[in-house]
Amino acid sequence: MAPVGVGPEKIPGDKLFQTVPAVRRGHSVVLDNQDICQAFAANSALSIGYALGRTVPLFAKALRD
């Protein structure tokens, strides 16, 4: 999850967020790196490649844990 309008530190404790089955099983990623968030927001060929290169390992770890 990329935070919009709230700090990334508040998301894991959010009651609604905690209702998501994958979150309850511990398979979530909250993006707290501004460069990655901005890369997704820019939505260009270069920025998406940058963002995916840095988030895929985070997603893989969340799925393994």
Image (cartoon, helix red, strand yellow):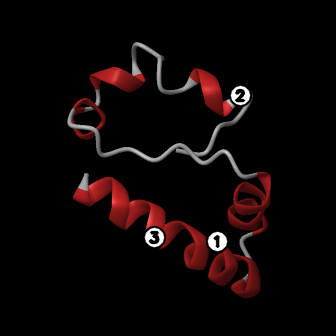
Q: Secondary structure at mark 2?
A: loop
Query: Residue 52 appears at what percent x and percent y?
Result: 56, 75
Using a 10 Å C-alpha cutoff, classify the residue at mark 2 as few (fewer than 14 neighbours), some (14 to 19) or many (20 or more): few
Q: Is residue 23 left or right of residue 30?
A: left
Picture layout, residue 44 above or below residue 11: below
Q: Secondary structure at mark 3?
A: helix
Picture layout, residue 53 above or below residue 8: below
Q: Is residue 47 left or right of residue 57?
A: right
- Of circles 1 and 3, the one toward us is 3
Q: Amino acid at mark 1?
A: Ala
The residue at which mark 1 appears reads as 51
Query: Residue 2 appears at what percent x and percent y?
Result: 60, 45
Q: Secondary structure at mark 1?
A: helix
The residue at which mark 2 appears reads as 7
Picture layout, residue 44 above or below residue 62: below
CB contact under 8 Å: marks 2 and 1: no
The residue at which mark 3 appears reads as 57
Residue, x 75% and y 86% (percent of image)? 46
Question: For residue 35, which quarter of the picture?
Answer: bottom right
Query: Residue 43 appears at what percent x and percent y?
Result: 71, 71
CB contact under 8 Å: marks 2 and 3: no
Residue, x 54% and y 26% (percent of image)? 11
